[in-house]
Amino acid sequence: MAASKVGRALAKGLGIRLNYRNELNDEIRRGESVFSTTTADTYVEEEPTTLEWVHDILPSGHELVQYTRSLFPFLDWMGSYNLQWLAGDLVAGITIGAVVVPQGMAYAVLANLKPQFGLYSSFMGVLIYWFFATSKDITIGPVAVMSTLVGNILVKAAKTNPDVPGHVIASCLAVIAGCIIVFIGLIRCGWIVDLIPLVSISAFMTGSAINIAAGQVPTLMGISSYFNTRASTYLVIINTLKNLHHSTLDAAIGLTSLTMLYLIRAACKFAAKKFPSRQKAIFFIATLRTAFVILLYILISWLVNRHHRKKPKFKILGTVPRGFQNAAVPTVNKSIIKIFASDLPSTVIVLLIEHIAISKSFGRINNYIINPSQEMVAIGVTNILGPFLGAYPATGSFSRTAIKSKAGVRTPFAGVITAVVVLLAIYALPAMFYYIPSAGLSAVIIHAVGDLITPPNTVYQFWRVSPVEVPIFFAGVFVTIFSSIENGIYTTICVSAAILIFRIIKAKGRFLGKIKVHSVAGDSIIGDSGKPVLADHGNFTKSGGSHEDASTRNVFLPIDHGDGSNPDVEVSVPYTGIFIFRFSEGFNYPNANQYLDQLTNHIFATTRRTNLDHYDRPGDHPWNDPAPRGKKKKALVAEQGDRPTLKAIILDFSSVNNVDLTSVQQLIDVRNQLDRYTAPSVVDWHFTSINNRWTKRALVSAGFGYPSVTEGDNSLHRWKPIFSVAEIGGSDSAAQVAENTANEKELKAARTLEQERPSHGDGIHADSDSGLSSGDIKGVAVKASGRVAVVHGLNRPLFHIDLTSALQSAIANVQARDEFEGRGGPGIGEVP
């Protein structure tokens, strides 16, 4: 109580008006007794409060417990683990292990690191991820695009900071990027990836695939020493063509291994169609093609180079140390961070979009939902802990994820099986890795990234869905080819964001008209024999009755048929002087001016001033609206004389979720502008389909939602309240029947008293279209056979449930005003 008094005193001292609105709350609370007895309880909508908002935002104790548990999703399924799941995980885990070992080493070379670092990254990725995973299909490890970015960073660092080993920089990059991603995931801001559109991801994947493939061709042909293979893609392609005549024996290894990879895949695809009963076995053969080709060329390389270890006939991988030789606490300091600081945003973006996009896609395919925020935690923790064993940045792999899904993986625990396979490779196979041909690894990379290129049919589908985004796609691809992968990412994201902002700013609303439609099944109209919504005596039909299949109904379409509706169907103006305007892209500060300019321009073009003699003398006209002279004046008067005056505006807020200070202030300005335009009358503002309580609060604070009443104004007495009501159940009970009888008696007595009361000139009596029994808000009554209640608050009579109720209210009040003004206004017919 004391705090309230202090607050009021402080507000008074600062000149803050706490009670600056007149919502007629007292009028409604006192005057709805008849309405209350015929329904359940009078409903007055309360405003949301700041404390309520804070309460909704702050987590409760139970929510904190749920949040903590959600950080370890394996707790939800590990207790139900069984042998059948284990069998599926074993098959999938071993299969992925056979794929990730050669790919990991190939991607490490692509990252300008030694092959063992790819194995370290592969091991830590699959080992750690399953603790935090919400996707059973994702395989975390080295990927082509991320490896390319790391390689570019290390190439630049070798020139600027030659004293810092490359793997130290890569490990530091993984830790910093991992910390950023973990933070985003812990605060549950996984929605941030939704800011990156599909077209950006597709352009990024396609451009990166072309960039990586072009960069691997020189190694495939044995000519990588003749030029810089990490230059812009177009330069690499040009230099490759120029130096093809320098090709070495590596070309024989590379081209044959690449051809073999594609031939095995094509043969397996054909065999799967030919022998559908053996698809599972054929799938595993196709999956293991990479391991088979690498093993075959290891054998060939050993046969060719076993006596030429110091000077091999073609380039081979060389010594791969056994075990985790680079395990150490990663070095993180300012000097190292400065080396890759400019590349950190693109690193984080690549780690996120590739992983989240893949996990969402396979989640939909396999009918489960991933948590993007938790996936960020998984990626981040993997990249934070991985560098302790020498790993570099890792994320989800598309090719390995697809293989894992098709292999029948059952749970994320399959990653542990893969980790065992990789661990065996690290300790048992390094001697064999020595003979792996570099050209063979390049063939593996080219074969892997080939599937990332967006096929022409998909691009055509983009064109069919959204033509404006196809140029963005090609822009991203071309920038990647002629500049870099990072610039391609930034280009597509920035251009997509610019188009989105432009669409919001230049949004256009629609002026709606009314048509009556019928639903036709075959050659008969649905509901043609149905009963009317209201019986002759005004009672409601029970829910589920025939009124739900009424033969006709009113719908609202754009008057200009801008939605593609049949132009032969005539859309009629809802009512003379009443305009229905629908927002299309929300209603906030970027587009508020655009919307309201469109609204006022249309109104000024189709209506006239209420008072044609608003300006007494030519000099009273403003400079932008000079007085017409001579023939122009007569023509203008004749033209405007045929136009209606503005009566009411209905705003459809079905696409509006939030409003802000700018949009509401501009709405106030337009209201004032139109009130001057219609003086001495005023414009009624009706709102429909408001979905947010805070939006209602904002509009009410600006004076919308209820009739405006000024001092000495009797407009309330000519206002006709119309509310939407609905049944609340219990209409068949005996107690309800007795209550209805009592209510009927009370209602008849109230109507008798109303008829005996002296009539006032400004009163509006009950009529058939509204069902109201008095001329002001104190006489609202609804007669119903069941228990009904208002849908929206009685203190917000100009906020409506749909366009139909808004139009009914607008028409009723326009007619009431015309009747009131036609009788001469206040004081006419009053008893002295």
Image: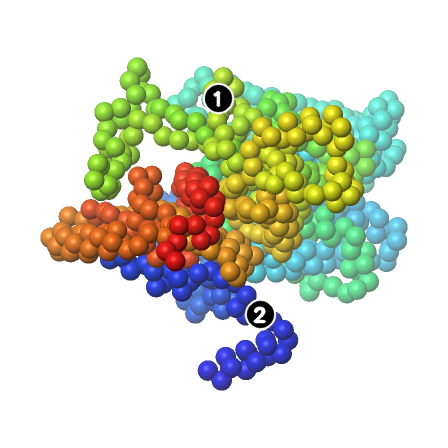
Disc 1 on helix, strand or loop?
loop
Q: Which residue is mark 2?
A: 17
Specify the amino acid type for callout 2.
Arg
Q: Which residue is mark 1?
A: 570
Percent from the top left, x then y, of residue 62? 41, 67
Disc 2 on helix, strand or loop?
loop
Specify the amino acid type for callout 1.
Glu
Q: Is residue 561 left or right of residue 246?
A: left
Percent from the top left, x then y, of residue 29? 36, 63
Percent from the top left, x then y, of residue 829? 39, 50
Q: Residues within 10 Å of mark 2 (few under 14, many from 20)?
A: few
Indicate whether 450 appears above or below 9: above
Q: Quadrant of the C terminus?
A: bottom left
Q: Residues within 10 Å of mark 1 (few under 14, many from 20)?
A: few
Residue at 59% over, 24% down:
464
Q: Quadrant of residue 813?
A: top left
In the rendered structure, which disc, 2 or 1, sits on the residue that comes first in sequence?
Answer: 2
Residue 135 appears in view: no
